[in-house]
């Protein structure tokens, strides 16, 4: 069975989702549940930290596509950080960098949200 | 040049839980065949996508279907033949994904086949006798 873990923490008013292991069609529903919980509690500003994510298939990428519009409609967004090259290459192949913001580290992504709040 | 020919087969039931088993099988077989690490990753993901499509669309998440994966390796290429009996399928009816449109419609699907084509040198679907479908994924050695 695929080894996968998803957990959420807070940095100020921003929610950070930490992903670990293998995100595929079997484990994607765990990530969907996490997004549903955030929406239920009206948290729309999300940084997904990929530092420990080793693998992603299109089922995993699809989760972000299914939820990002709801976040943006509520003055939030899903931003990505700490992605390993192998994982980024898959996002890149599908054209995600045009529609999503990618950051080298989590702090940069959080700061981007905070800058937008101030402007 | 050393000849690295092999022929391996795996049969799994149509559950997403088995995707990790499928990936391990592809990774082991293609690594042993001397494929580069980058290409091992590409073939592994493409086979994951093909099997995910079969589980989702051919068997509609029913866990009792069979998926047969046959990997043939020779000096030129790696060829992965995947067969299911979940009913005929016309790949020409699957549209090219429009990311922005899918996102606006809050749809997470429709990326798998496109990704397979990007990762492999060729992807060929064939309707076999009975209800069987076959997809052959080919990667030439770089």
Image (spheres, coloured by chain):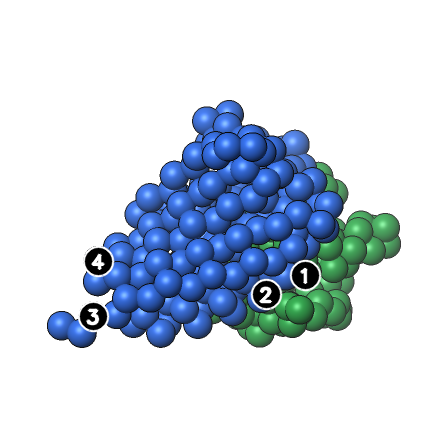
Chain colours: A green, B blue
The residue located at (41%, 69%) in the rendering is B29
Are the residues tagged 2 and 1 within 8 Å (C-beta)? yes
Q: Chain of mark 1?
A: B
Crowdedness near tag 1: few (<14), some (14–19) or many (≥20) residues, C-alpha within 10 Å: some
Q: Is residue B126 above or below residue A52?
A: above
| Residue at the disc numbered 4 | B76
Please tell me whether mark 1 sits on a helix, a strand or a loop.
helix
| Residue at the disc numbered 2 | B20
Q: Chain of mark 4?
A: B
Q: Earlier in the sequence, mark 1 or mark 3?
A: 3
Query: Is B25 situated left or right of A109 in this image?
Result: left
Which quadrant is home to the N terminus of chain B?
bottom left
Please tell me whether mark 2 sits on a helix, a strand or a loop.
helix
Hey, which residue is sitting farthest top in the picture? B93
Crowdedness near tag 3: few (<14), some (14–19) or many (≥20) residues, C-alpha within 10 Å: few
The residue located at (32%, 70%) in the rendering is B33
- Quarter of the image where one finds residue B13: bottom right
Please tell me whether mark 3 sits on a helix, a strand or a loop.
loop
Q: Separation of disc 2 and disc 4 at Cα?
A: 27 Å
| Residue at the disc numbered 1 | B17
Hey, which residue is sitting farthest front in the picture? B129
Q: Earlier in the sequence, mark 1 or mark 4?
A: 1
Which of A18/B16 is in front?
B16
Do marks 2 and 1 share a chain?
yes
Are the residues tagged 4 and 3 within 8 Å (C-beta)? no
Q: Separation of disc 2 and disc 1 at Cα?
A: 7 Å
């Amino acid at each position: 069975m695929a080894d996968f873990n998803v957990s959420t923490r807070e940095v100020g008013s921003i929610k950070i989702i930490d992903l670990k292991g293998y995100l595929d069609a079997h484990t994607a529903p765990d990530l969907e549940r996490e997004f549903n919980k955030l929406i239920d509690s009206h948290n729309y500003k999300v940084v997904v930290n990929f530092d420990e994510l080793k693998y992603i298939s299109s089922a995993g990428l699809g989760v972000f596509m299914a939820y990002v519009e709801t976040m943006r409609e509520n003055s939030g967004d899903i931003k990505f950080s700490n992605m390993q090259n192998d994982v980024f290459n898959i996002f890149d192949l599908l054209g995600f960098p045009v529609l999503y913001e990618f950051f080298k580290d989590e702090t940069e992504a959080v700061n981007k949200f905070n800058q937008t709040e101030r402007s | 040049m050393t000849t690295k020919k092999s022929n391996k087969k795996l049969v799994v039931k149509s559950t997403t839980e088995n995707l990790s088993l499928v990936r391990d099988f592809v990774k082991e077989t293609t690594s042993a065949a001397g494929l580069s690490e980058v290409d091992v990753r590409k073939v592994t993901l493409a086979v994951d996508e093909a099997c995910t499509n079969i589980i989702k669309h051919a068997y509609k998440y029913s866990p009792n279907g069979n998926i047969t994966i046959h990997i043939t390796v020779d000096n030129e290429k790696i060829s992965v033949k995947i067969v299911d009996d979940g009913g005929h399928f016309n790949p020409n009816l699957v549209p090219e994904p429009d990311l922005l449109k899918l996102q606006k419609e809050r749809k997470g699907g429709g990326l798998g086949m496109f990704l397979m084509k990007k990762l492999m040198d060729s992807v060929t679907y064939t309707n076999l006798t009975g209800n069987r479908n076959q997809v052959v994924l080919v990667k030439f050695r770089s």
